[in-house]
Image (spheres, grey):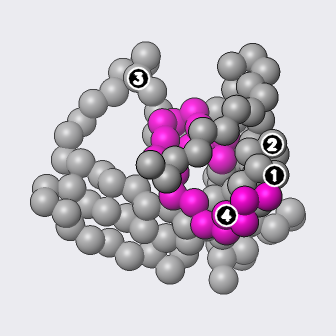
Amino acid sequence: RGVEVLTLPAPNGCLELPALMRELGAREVVSLMVEAGGNFSGALLAAGLVHKLRLYLAPLLIGGQQAVPVLGDPGWAHLADAPRLHRISYRRVGEDLRIEGYLAVPAEGNTASEAVS
């Protein structure tokens, strides 16, 4: 009940984010919470579609060369190009740490610290 399934283009198995945004806009969706894996999260960030980020950090060290990263490609070649969080809050949730903040993307030609407002 209350669920609508959208069928959207997915060339090469990847959802077309502009098509998704058009469909959501047509339905007057102005806010969306996304719980996603590293690849989809990275694609949303790279497309400039993330306004607020909530990240949970567990005191558990996992990984390896084949592990899925928190943020998949494309990534950022230089730290100055990487999106930064501002208005950050931290909250302990059980043993985990919740980090929440708003994105500040550097303006072209500025370093990350210059772009944060």
Q: Residue at x 57, y 33 (%)?
A: 39
Q: Residue lying farthest front? A: 1
Name the residue carrying label 2. Answer: 19
Q: Is residue 95 visible?
A: yes
Q: Earlier in the sequence, mark 1 or mark 4?
A: 1
Query: Mark 4 against mark 3, which lies toward the viewer?
Result: 4
Name the residue carrying label 1. Answer: 22
- Residue 46 position in % (x across, y down): 71, 47
Q: Amino acid at mark 4?
A: Val
Q: Which mark is residue 67?
A: 3
Q: Amino acid at mark 2?
A: Ala
The Cα–Cα distance between marks 2 and 1, rounded to whole angstroms, is: 5 Å
> Tag 1's secondary structure?
helix
Give the extent of the magenta segment.
26-44
- Residue 97 position in % (x across, y down): 26, 60
Q: Is residue 76 visible?
A: no
Residue 98 vs 15, above or below: the answer is: below
